[in-house]
Amino acid sequence: MRHAPRTLSHVCEVPLPVDQTRSRVDGYDFRAPDSWDQFADVVALAYGGYEAVPEYRKIIGDIFEPKRSLLAHRAGETCATLALYSLDMSVPGGRQPIAGIGYVTVDPTHRRRGLMRDLIRRTLTGLHDRGEEAVAALHTTEPAIYGRFGFGSATRAVRIRIPRSSRELSTRPPAAPTDPPPSVRVLDPARCGAEITRIYEHAIDRRPGMPRRDGTWMRRALLDLPERRGGAGRLLCMLAGADDGEPATGYALYSLTAHWENSYPRYEVHVRELFANDPTAYVNLWRALLDIDLGGTVIADRPVDDAILALLDDPRSAAPVARDQLYTRPVDVARALAGRGYGAEVDLVLAVADPICPWNVGRWRLRTGTYEGECARTSAPADLALTVRELGAVHLGGTSLTQLAAAGRVVEHRAGALRAATRAFHHDPAPFCPTVF
């Protein structure tokens, strides 16, 4: 039996009035930039006026895609920016082209004029009209801003701080006293870029939310400028399982920050990345990080279901704190939902509202098989009502539709539809995005 429809403005099935979706910005010229240099000054102002050193500016310029990006221009000056990146990202069931949005900035003297909204609207409209990426994603410095543009919180990270007193690991069976020490070497990351790339590439398809890195993106991931270390030492790399000519099966990128307590060294060990292709390499890397000479607290941002929380004898001591990470939203609902895999078979109708992209508004029938789905418009009654923000939040499989419904953000019109949809969209392991763009 269907529930009586509920009337909620955020799950309506009609487009917003025209004057809310069209540009309210007059006197500005929107166009693609010629190069990163046209972005640089506005970006620097938006992020506090810090001057980018030449090496950093070059690597940002190398990954920049000027033909896909957009700026607002007036009276010979750049007033607002939006960079667009062509990403290949892991999603449930495989990989999917993702439009990565970054450096959305507005000159301080041009704020409060709708420039940010217009840049995003124009970008999403262009992607749709050209039939390009069906999903857009971004990282945000201010999460409250992007929900109104349809972006939902899709991945989360947990910050852990493992103190020196909590180094014991719950490995089973325990290592015997006669066992050889773990095979872990410390190297300059510049010497092992190929191994890091290979291990990272192997890890992509196991966890949604991880973008593929070509050579330029990997150079950015390994960038280690003294001006950006925040007082830490140089970046180091641990490779696990690399003895006797065998390839490494795990790596950790980390640095140390000097810290002393009562004349005792208690250096902070900051883990930038850690990926391993097997449990042995994973455990050996953590064992080595927790046993660094002079080391005190080990600090890392990890997936919310990372095995380190099960590996520690005393996980409470790590004081895990969860935070939001990547935000995604469908550019084209039908192609976005058909482009990912599913964990259960469902046949349901979604009533979707979208404040920016009117072509997404309406009812969509989603039918999923094993690891695939198809989605098309329908006139059938809705089973669930939600906005693209909720679809973005669940796209990578880490956010629960049931949780969103408990918050009043999803409405169930057919009993059982919510539970079935939650199972279908869920992915294990949880999504995680190690790359900020």
Image (cartoon, rainbow, N blue to C red):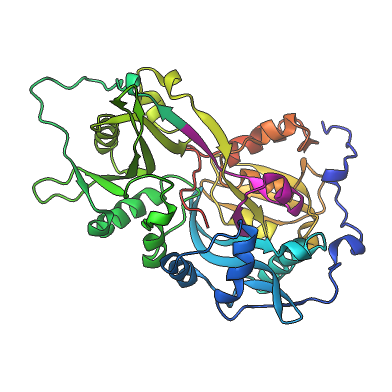
Image location (x, y in percent) of residue 341 = 53, 49
- Residue at (46% x, 48% y) in the render: 434
* Quarter of the figure that contains the N terminus: top right
Residue 61, above or below 117: below
- Residue at (43% x, 20% y) in the render: 317
Residue 49, above or below 72: above
The outermost residue toward the front is 263
Residue 224, above or below 258: below
Count of numbered circles on the image: 0
Q: Is residue 304 visible?
A: no
Image location (x, y in percent) of residue 76 = 72, 82
Q: Along the line of sight, which residue is nearer the eye, 343 or 115? A: 115
Q: Does the magenta stretch include residue 426?
A: no
Residue 410 placement, left or right of 398: right
**Magenta span of residues:** 133-159
Could you say which quadrant of the image residue 212 lies in? bottom left
Image location (x, y in percent) of residue 46 = 65, 59
Q: Along the line of sight, which residue is nearer the eye, 280 or 320? A: 320
- Residue at (33% x, 43% y) in the render: 255
